[in-house]
Image (cartoon, rainbow, N blue to C red):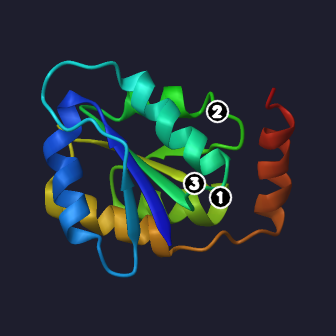
Amino acid sequence: MKVVIGCDHGGVELKEYLKAHLQDNIEIIDVGTDTKKSVDYPDFAFKVGTLVSLGRADFGILICRTGVGMSIAANKITNIRAALCHCEKYAELARCHNDANVLCLGADFTEPSEAVRIARKFLSTEFLGGRHFRRVKKIISREG
């Protein structure tokens, strides 16, 4: 499995923690940033979203201080369904009901160990399809 990960300056520490704890059978593509120098979160959301949208990665993970900006920006990319998840249950439901393909995390609100659990749940949960597919198709139909 390939996972592309990106963050702004507020998510660098959590990104590095996740990379160190998600290595099992996962190829991680890190698109930055690698410094706490202020950067613009949309740039990294677009990088991650584009790689997932083009099929160069199976999933994406985005981190900023709240996760809100990243989720808004990533959802502007065709074929991206980014979900801000605060717990494992959100991650599970985002995957199995919404076929989310980008996980967004808020570094200021998510403990590193919890972020690992959330990411593992997100990456290991399958989309259920069925009635959920009908709903996801409606979302997809609205993309530019």
Q: Which residue is mark 3?
A: 101
Measure the alpha-carbon separation of dots 1 and 3: 6 Å
- Residue at position x 32%, y 80% in the image: 24
State the mark number for residue 77. Answer: 2
Q: Position of residue 85 (x, y in %)?
A: 40, 49
Q: In the depicted view, which residue is nearer to us: 71 or 77? A: 77
Q: Which residue is mark 1?
A: 99
Measure the alpha-carbon separation of dots 2 and 3: 12 Å
Q: In the depicted view, which residue is nearer to us: 101 or 26? A: 26
Question: What element does badge 3 sit on?
Answer: loop
The first of marks 2 and 3 along the sequence is 2
Quadrant for the C terminus, please: top right
- Residue 78 vertical position relative to residue 91 in the rendered view, above or below: above
- Residue at position x 59%, y 50% in the image: 52
Question: What element does badge 1 sit on?
Answer: loop
Disc 3 marks a residue whose amino acid type is Asn
Measure the alpha-carbon separation of dots 2 and 1: 15 Å
Side of 50 relative to 16 (left or right): right
Mark 1 surroundings: few (<14), some (14-19) or many (≥20) residues within 10 A: many
Disc 1 marks a residue whose amino acid type is Asp
The first of marks 2 and 1 along the sequence is 2
- Residue 52 vertical position relative to residue 141 in the rendered view, above or below: below
Q: Position of residue 29 (x, y in %)?
A: 39, 55
- Residue 84 vertical position relative to residue 132 in the rendered view, above or below: above
Side of 119 relative to 38 (left or right): right
Disc 2 marks a residue whose amino acid type is Ile
In which quadrant of the rendered view does residue 36 lie? Answer: top left
Mark 2 surroundings: few (<14), some (14-19) or many (≥20) residues within 10 A: many
Question: What element does badge 2 sit on?
Answer: loop
